[in-house]
Image: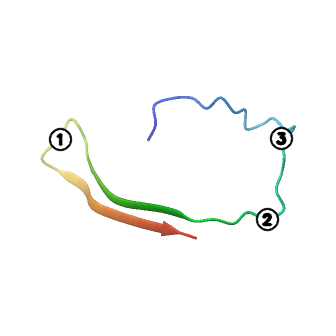
Amino acid sequence: MLDRESEIDPSDESGLTLDTVRGEIEIRNVSFKYPTRPMLRIFRDFMLNYS
């Protein structure tokens, strides 16, 4: 989705590891279509809630 590389090295083990992670991710009203096929909408008002 994002056209960039992370500055965080996923193989680096020197960071803090949490015992428990709590939270929620919510995505609302996402619309998407490919630039090469603008008439074909892939998502329209897509919603996702992850907890």
Residue type marked 1: Arg
- Quarter of the image with the C terminus is bottom right
Q: Residue 11: where, in percent of width, then height?
A: 78, 36
Residue matched to label 3: 15
- Sequence order check, earlier mark of 3 and 1: 3
Look at the numbered disc 2 and give the secondary structure of its residue.
loop
- Quarter of the image with the N terminus is top left
**How many numbered marks, from 0 up?**
3
Mark pair 2, 3: CA separation = 15 Å
Q: Which residue is depicted at the point 22% across and 36% down?
A: 35
Residue matched to label 1: 37
Residue matched to label 2: 20
Residue type marked 3: Gly
Mark pair 3, 1: CA separation = 42 Å
Residue type marked 2: Thr
Residue 20 located left or right of residue 43: right
Q: Nearer the viewer, residue 46 or 22?
A: 22
